[in-house]
Amino acid sequence: MHIPDGFLNAETWVTMDIVAGLGIVYAIRKTKTSLGERQIPLMGVMAAFIFAAQMLNFPIAGGTSGHFIGGVMAAVLLGPWAATLVMSTIFIVQCLLFQDGGLTALGANIFNMGIIGTVFGYYIYRGVMISFGGKKGLLWGVGIASWLAVVLAATFCSIELAFSGTVPLRAALPAMAGVHALIGVGEAIISVGVIRLILKARPDLLQRYG
């Protein structure tokens, strides 16, 4: 889902850079007042884990592959805005050091996966968790939100490509949403598995935001 250079026109990528930049500034302000000493080192641990996990690809239909994103999982443990900073840092490092996603498309990639896929995903998770209640609700919330976050990120990616004239929306949206609906299943399985392990080993990590 990382958009490379040349796929977005100037108007689109400049707009997305501004939007993503404003989102990061807001996230920094929010985390200054919400994070405690315990959450700060956890941000580093989560960034390292998600960065490594994103390097592993799993096969899906048609010979294509997908990879873990991790925004919802990070938000469940850190809160949505600290998770936004973690995800943004990962995408910046991937772009600058590994050429994974274009420099001009960096704002769009941060917005799609690091803001939409994290903040919106977190509130979907909260809604499901509150509706179901208890541990079952928490795990269902993680699974549903993780899947939806991937599909939402893919949908926004399709819209940006269509606005740029790269591919018509009627072609991009079904293709992107369809493929990433499958990728989202893998995202949900991994996220639920990790949160289940944390519930058993360190449930205190979920007390603040879970």
Image (cartoon, rainbow, N blue to C red):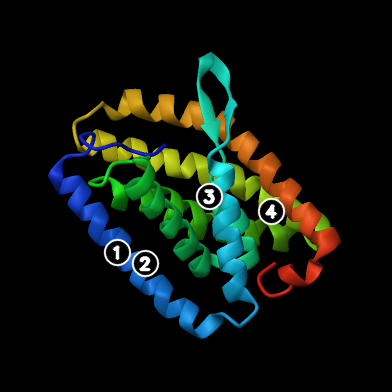
Q: Amino acid at mark 1?
A: Gly
Q: Nearer the viewer, mark 3 or mark 1?
A: 3
Q: Nearer the viewer, mark 4 or mark 3?
A: 3
| Residue that badge 4 annotates | 141
Place residue 85 in its image quadrant: bottom left
Q: Amino acid at mark 3?
A: Phe
**Left-right relation of 208 to 34:** right
**Numbered disc 4: secondary structure:** helix
Instruction: Check residue 51 in the rendering and tell me which mark sits there, or answer none.
Output: 3
Instruction: Check residue 21 in the rendering and tell me which mark sits there, or answer none.
Output: 1
In the rendered image, the vertical position of residue 120 relative to residue 149, given as above or below: below
Mark 1 → mark 4, Cα distance in angstroms: 28 Å
Q: Residue at x 38, y 42 (%)?
A: 98
- How packed mark 4 is, by other alpha carbons closer than 10 Å (few <14, some 14-19, many 20 or more), is many
Mark 2 → mark 4, Cα distance in angstroms: 25 Å
Q: Amino acid at mark 4?
A: Gly
Q: Nearer the viewer, mark 1 or mark 4?
A: 1
